[in-house]
Image: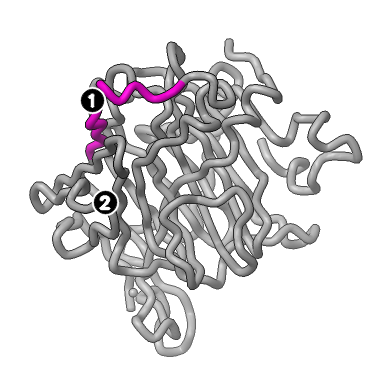
Amino acid sequence: MATSSSTSAFSVSLLPLIIIFLGSTSSVVFADFYNEFDITWGDGRGKILSGDQLTLSLDKSSGSGFESRNEYLFGKIDMQLKLVPGNSAGTVTAYYVCSYLITCFFCPPKAPTGMRLISSSWVHLSGDPYILHTNVFSQGKGNREQQFYLWFDPTADFHTYSILWNPQRIIFSVDGTPIREFKNAESIGVPFPKAQPMRIHSSLWNADDWATRGGLVKTDWSQAPFTASYRNFKADACVVSSAGKSSSCNNNNGSTTTSSGSNWFSEELDNTKQQRLRWVQKNYMIYNYCSDSKRFPQGFPPECNTTP
């Protein structure tokens, strides 16, 4: 069973990652990367290889990143990733959805006011397994980190990383197994991202100044270029219009509809998935802000009473 360490885990907790969607009725999209995403930086280090596969690379000069052309407001997003193999200590692969006027290539430790962010990132420490880091920002407030080891080698093959975002909750899943649920707790004063459309972003970059045991271990550039691979993006979501005033999930009368047979807009964890969530959190969670008493000596944030 993994044990929590607030000191070591918090040192890796400044990086997020993640996902989101929109449209008149939502539809399941098996994305064509050429049409759905743009490589936004990296001087050719990011490449769309085909309609269903993309890679990001990092060398000593630069990393790379991409973002979705569409903005989304609620939905369910899947992306298959294969992380950087070998001795890639110091590298961070970030996958996230965010919305604010400044392009968010990297998930900042302190989010600008108005930013909405749901994020996942993978941090690799020398000699240790990858750490999957999750965070949720709303109205400029984040610091809701949970971190996990994975029960498989994420560099050996592709695995599906999913985010379900509806008005009641955000659920992070890996290969269909939920690892985290963040419930809407607006009734007790906790902001929840539900009004701001977001784009999907991902980036691969170097963080050896802090991620590798506080910067003690530096990236081995003889192993570069480091490459992360993506494929089979799928969205069942609400796509927001370019004017930002309507989404594909709204009827003319303002009510919400989703694609035929889709239940993500009201989905919650059933008993089986609740059991799987508890299994992951018991055996693979290594940091939970809701149990870090040193960080919150005056008492835990109010949403911690609603977080599994």
Residue 219 among those drawn in magenta = yes
Furthest-bottom residue in this view: 252
Which class describes the residues within 10 Å of circle 2: few (<14), some (14-19), or many (20+)?
many
Residue 273 visible somewhere in the drawing: no
Query: Do the residues under discs 1 and 2 have CB atoms within 8 angstroms?
Result: no
Residue 77 among those drawn in magenta = no
Circle 2 is placed at which residue position? 42
Circle 1 is placed at which residue position? 157
* Residue 59 image position (x, y, % from top left): 27, 36
* Residue 137 image position (x, y, % from top left): 60, 55
From the viewer's perspective, is residue 214 above or below residue 14?
above
Give the residue type at disc 2.
Answer: Gly
- Looking at the image, residue 248 sits to the left or right of residue 289; the answer is left
Give the residue type at disc 1.
Answer: Asp
* Residue 165 image position (x, y, % from top left): 48, 55
Residue at screen point 70% across, 25% down: 6
- Looking at the image, residue 138 sits to the left or right of residue 38; the answer is right
Residue 205: quadrant of the picture: top left
Which class describes the residues within 10 Å of circle 1: few (<14), some (14-19), or many (20+)?
few
Residue at screen point 82% across, 29% down: 294
From the viewer's perspective, is residue 114 above or below residue 201?
below
Residue at screen point 17% across, 56% down: 33
Instruction: Give the Cα separation between the discs numbered 1 and 2.
Output: 24 Å
Point out the stretch of residues depicted in magenta: 218-229
| Closest to the observer, 75 or 135 | 135
From the viewer's perspective, is residue 122 above or below residue 217?
below
* Residue 168 image position (x, y, % from top left): 59, 57
Q: Nearer the viewer, mark 1 or mark 2?
A: 2
